[in-house]
Image (cartoon, coloured by chain):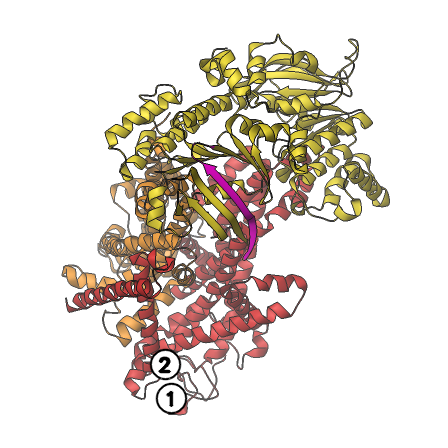
Amino acid sequence: MALGLLTLLIVSIVIFVAVNLLPGDFAELILGQGATPEAVAKIREDLGLDQSLVSRYFGWLGGMLTGDLGSSFAQLNFQTNLGGAGGVTVAEQIAPRFANTMFLATVTAIIAVPIAVTLGILAALYRNTVFDRAANILTLSSISSPEFFMAYVLILFLAVLNPILPSLSNIYEGMAFSDRLEKTLLPALTLTLVVTAHMMRMTRAAIINLLASPYIEMARLKGMSPLRVIVKHALPNALAPIINVIALNLAYLITGVVVVEVVFVYPGIGQLFVDSVKIRDIPVVQACCLIFAAAYILLNLTADILSILSNPRLRHPK
Amino acid sequence: MSALFNIALGVAIIAAVAWSFRFIGQKVTGNAARFRDMSFGVAFGYVLGLVVLLWLVWAYLQSISSDQATANKFFFLGVAIKAFILFSILAWLFRLLGRNVGTAGTRKMFRNIPLTASFGILVIIFYAVLAIFAGAIAPYGQDEIISGVAANIIPGGDPALGGDPAFPLGTDQIGRDILSRLIFGAQNTVGIAFATTLLAFFIGGSLGFLAAVVGGWLDQVLSRGVDVLMAIPSLIFALLLMTIASVWSAELGIPLTFFMVLIIAVIDSTRVFRLARAVGQNIVVMDYIEAAKLRGEGMGYLVFKEILPNATAPLLAEFGLRFCFVFLTIAALSFLGVGIQPPLADWGTMVRDLASFINFAQFAPLAATAPLLAAGAIALLTVAVNFVVDWMLHKSSGLKE
Amino acid sequence: MTDTLLNIRGLKLEGRSDETWNPIINGVDLTLARGEVLGLIGESGAGKSTLGLAAMGFTRDGVRISNGSVEFDGIDLLTASAAVKRGLLGKRIAYVAQSAAASFNPAHRLIDQHVEGPVQHGVMARADSELDGMELYEKLRLPDPESIGFRYPHQVSGGQLQRAMTAMAMACRPDLIIFDEPTTALDVTTQIEVLASIRDIVEQFNTAAIYITHDLAVVAQMADRIKVLLKGDEVETADTRTMLSAPTQEYTKSLWAVRSFERPLKAPVVASAVPVVSVANVDAAYGKAKVLHDVSFDMHEGRTVAVVGESGSGKSTTARCITGLLPPTAGTISFGGEAMPADYRKRSKDQLRQVQMIYQMADTALNPRMSIGEIIARPVQFYLGLTGKEKRARVDALLDQIEMEPSEYYNRLPSELSGGQKQRIGIARALAAEPKFIICDEVTSALDQLVAEGILRLLAKLQDRLGLTYMFITHDLATVRAIADEVVVMKDGRVVEAGPKAEMFKPPHHPYTDLLLSSVPEMDPDWLTNLLQERGVDNIGDAAADKM
């Protein structure tokens, strides 16, 4: 746990330092070359650029922890050029989109996890059969294909040729849950395809590894039924690796959402991130980056902790 | 609701057929072991597989139906089925060729090769030829806007459908030949990805082996550093650094693509480092390394004569995987608009530019093929490399699985 | 009602490698009467385990039965349905595996795994089976029979797990138990307890058993009848006493003869002679854990000093101190009377050259990417500075010395050699440095007996010809008897006893040496019975070792 927090802290330093490697002045970056000196000075003060790097870092980190993610460049530009308060702060931009992304990830996980684990176990049980080989080829192809390829293939078949689902995920606040789900389904299916393939292959490998253990052979030699061998002997030991696989793949989802959100114009944090990258809105990029990293670290940490908890050697020390 | 009902009905029918299949099998073969010990799930699987196969045949027949609307609807499935059959035949022929031509070593290799790997090798050779000779093969330049030719010519080369035989894959929104851009894309996208992977291997590999052999604090420092870098999802980190690099690139006048190569190589070298270190550590504990150390051998001899030769197999497989990863990352960045920059032709960018044509699929299926071709070109190569790597790993692990 | 329990006729098994099927067992017949114990012996690769499993109608992945029949109590196991076979396995035929630690499911307690068979096969209710399990634990002399079952496998020692597994096999009172090398992974003092327990319980319940092992002395204690296998073929079968006293086949005779290899005694060392290597008051530690305590002994020119002890006794650590891989925390290592630097990195090239090492696992001791020629040539070039034709001539001479044809083997890779040949290359590499002193770390323990004997004879011959000094690390007292001039016994990082071999094998000696010596099974089929009578069941194995 402490290790996870420490990693996150170091990651935040890395992100902060990376951003501050930028040449020149943020203020000029925001306003362009022809800005008036007064405007530049005002922005410098707003951003705290007159303070030292270290105090700026702690100011930023403190803001992050309290939910104050600062002002976006777009907002500052808007304020400086048009005067007065206005625009949206980083936190205001991110909050609803973060919720949308979490919704997408949850829908994906609900579809993908049961399918992947079931198929992975089946492939391990019936390994080297036609089913296993076909699954191997299909999952390998799915892993190898770029997310946008899968997305467009799904759009082609499920939205254009057979208009079952909408190809644009224009979600807005106050939408009915069923509409929202319908609009989320296609991006979720795309992510499902990618993540399921990964998860299934990893589950298969973990189970095969397990089925090769002498204690599984022993259970079969004790005349136990195949079902009992799986349920009583393999599953309790497979739990740790399977949990690990699931957590790792949910972490992988985080990277996957970026491209998929862009394809489906899904108003999530990934799309905001890409848009901000394009207009070089540093505070937004920085905040998004930290949120992604935090989620990623958290999931990896969960994987570690759960797999420790499900290991009998560690649960029952000598 | 009716959809759910139909699915449930379908499953029930398949289950019933499966049960009778097993029952009849048992009766007909006089309770042969094959049917007697067959679990219901396996029987279900056989019938389900058969249903899928029948549906594919039906879909193919639809795609060549004379009714234009139906044919359009199944056009893509038809193409996919045709492509699958064609690729299988090609892979089979290639394997046959490999078994009969070449040195004893290559012939032996082709004897036990699965079709997927044979297909993978064939595709990789094809791409390599395209990438190296792009300039000679492509009919037009990659950024050549052909004068006097309309933009958005539909692929297929059939004037009746809005095509032009001179541009078999049509032209894009500003009148560039898509075929030429695809061919140059092979050069740019694959070439840049290859260079990036090489760089990542150079950085990660040398540091990884160093950490394994020297150990101690150097290993600690490098490993912790890599842990931190790996704690940030790679695409996210790449996007962050690309934002910064884009400012630098404008400031210094160095092309953004150069920064991209550097950034992705560094991010990816962390994965290479992990593997190289792990492989190195496995070798370092071997008794033959101890024997060499006790003989008084120097570091250079240890690394180059004792460790590296034993690490080539896993590193080669990793090179394939890393290449795929780098290639997909670059494609994703380009697709998002921050990767390889115009005027270089690049598949990721092409997909983004042509994506809207997909919406015409129902009425003019040919028009929708353009973006899918570019995306498919990316997928085909990574699938091919993965097939080969999968086979290599399978072979070197010596597993019967 | 016949007396035959198991009847195997013309059984052929094949194993898959590289997509082709190769024979493992080529048509073996086997009959077993009720209550009879059959010993199945052979070297690695003889197909004993495969045959043992096939007797249960079971094959591992990648193995198939291509011909023959297996009949258990009138039931043909090869054509029986999966359900019928499941009804027999565990209930009427049970299995005891080599590695108990890996064969118990780490997620369940011992007793839960014990009762699974009886409950699932409907033999006993859970509560009855639990009580019965405790009784069995007691019969097998496990400590705390009432509570040991409620532990998880990783909380119990290897020897105890092996007995708990025997109890589990007995849970349904089967007619037949297959023991697959149940004591191979154990130390000698632990092995003897397990052997005694297994023999008792099998006798008590009149269970038939197939006892698979590569150790002749063990099988002599356990079996009524012995069947010898060689590369998938039966060599001969006879009852134990006949087989031991009058084997008919050449192969069997040669197996028996290995045990009789012994070198002539050498004259005692002159008291004033300077030892080649001297270990003086050495302490060593891994991190904070101290593993050697005040270890001292000398090794003289042309002698073999056997360092004996069980796993964890510190014998390999002592070797690491001598080579300088693990610098001692106190004490000195001297060569020819002069103290050497503790760390090998500080030693001169000549000091490094004089101390060479031969490893236990020839597989990991040779770089798989180098040819045999390159491996041997490297020290020749490195230490002696020979190149070109001279180097080649020297390598050829070395290959001749280890009795391998230079022109045939020079360009081969280690993977193309057998285990014994690889070990010979390891010897040649050590000789190439022209050392005075060679450490042999369990060099024969991974090899089959016949091959091991060849290696021992070769080492003895080389010693006589070149005047080498050996430090011979081993846990096998038969090896000690065969090759040693002097013996050092170690336990828990201390030297327990040291002296010439002749004295060591004669009483009186230190009680631990005594225990160690008496625990080594002998070829006499009455050995175990006599020993148990002499010492009592509570004075063998770990129980006795703990008293010291």
Secondary structure, magenta segment, majority class: strand
Q: What is the crowding at mark 1: few (fewer than 14 residues within 10 Å), some, or many (at least 20)?
A: some
Q: What is the crowding at mark 2: few (fewer than 14 residues within 10 Å), some, or many (at least 20)?
A: many
Which chain gets the orange colouring? Answer: A
At numbered mark 1, what does the secondary structure look like: helix, strand or loop?
loop
Tally the marks: 2
Q: Is residue C412 visible?
A: yes
CB within 8 Å, label 1 to label 2: yes
Q: Which residue, given by chain and number where applicable, does mark 1 sit on?
A: B162
Magenta span contains residue A207: no
Q: Chain of mark 2?
A: B
Magenta span contains residue C24: yes
Residue at point 51%, 30% (across, down): C224
Q: Is residue B208 above or below residue C510?
A: below
Which chain gets the red colouring? Answer: B
| Closer to us: A22 or C37 | C37
| Closer to us: A53 or C243 | C243
Amino acid bearing label 1: Gly
Query: Residue B133: where, in percent of width, then height?
Result: 59, 74
Which chain gets the yellow colouring? Answer: C
Relative horizontal placement of residue B78, taking residue B274 as reference (left or right) = left
Mark 1 or 2, nearer chain start: 1
The image's mark for residue B367 is: 2
Query: Residue A238: where, in percent of width, then height?
Result: 35, 43
Q: Which residues are magenta?
A: C20-36
Residues at marks 1 and 2 on the same chain: yes
